[in-house]
Amino acid sequence: MSDEPSARRGIPDATVARLPVYLRALGALAERGTATVSSEELASAAGVNSAKLRKDLSHLGSYGTRGVGYDVEYLVYQISRELGLTQDWPVVIVGIGNLGHALAGYAGFATRGFEVVALFDSDPAVVGQQIGPLTVLPLDALEAFTAEQPVAIGVVATPAGPAQAVCDRLVEVGVRSVLNFAPVVLQVPPGVDVRKVDLSTELQILAFHEQRKAVAEAMGLDDADDDGGAAAAAAQAISAVTS
């Protein structure tokens, strides 16, 4: 397998998005002492179909062994290497409110290759607080800090109002990957990647599915029909009462 990054080897974005899910499932298997796993078992643990999983892993050059399956330990290594998790990535968090504080105290980052190296906030009441081994720094110290310490990823955990300005400052100091928890779409120049985490949007999507299932049940339909007829009928009913 080539050591080139995914983007240069043509791995689809959808596949890249599923790799962390496979890695989490493999981690659970490894903790149970499982040495090998079939594509069907791993697909079930990851919540995808086995054909999609096999196609995804083929992009990594991993095809498993007929009658045996995939070597769990080696597949963990392959996916970790592909995701860039065989090295540590320095992370800063800006916005140490309730969410930022929780993120700063999350021990799982370190075990997955992410080292939170600094915390920033503009509120004088928050600056100086100690969270684990780190002291919250004033936002105005961002430029001086990043001049001394390279930062790979910036986490924006501010309210919507200041989020774009914070993102701009992160980009200006050389941060090229941003994880955005603020309820706003951030505008960034080419070459900067933004991933948005929007819990309210995810809840709204779940609400839609709950509504669709309720309508399907009320109509005496099976929302899980393979032909999608029940889902379509329920969606049409929802549209009729909400339009």
Image: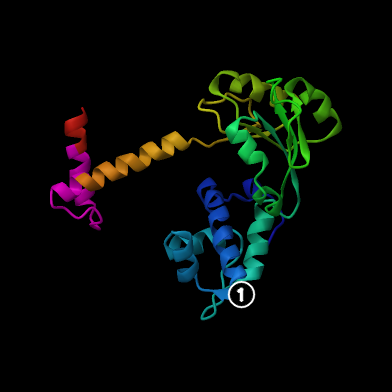
Residue 194 found in image quarter: top right
Question: Visible in this render: residue 179?
Answer: no
Image spot of residue 13 (x, y percent): 54, 46
Q: In which quadrant will I find the N terminus?
A: bottom right
**Above or below for 168 versus 4:** above
Asked if the magenta segment contains residue 206, the reply would be no
Specify the amino acid type for callout 1. Answer: Gly
Q: Is residue 236 left or right of residue 126?
A: left
Image spot of residue 210 (x, y percent): 29, 45
Report the residue at 19% width, 50% height from top: 230
- The residue at which mark 1 appears reads as 33
Along the line of sight, the residue nearer the viewer: 174 or 106: 106
The number of numbered discs placed on residues in the rendered structure image is 1
Report the residue at 56% width, 55% height from top: 19
Span colored in magenta: 215-237
Q: Is residue 26 left or right of residue 50?
A: right
Report the residue at 44% width, 65% height from top: 44
Disc 1 secondary structure class: loop
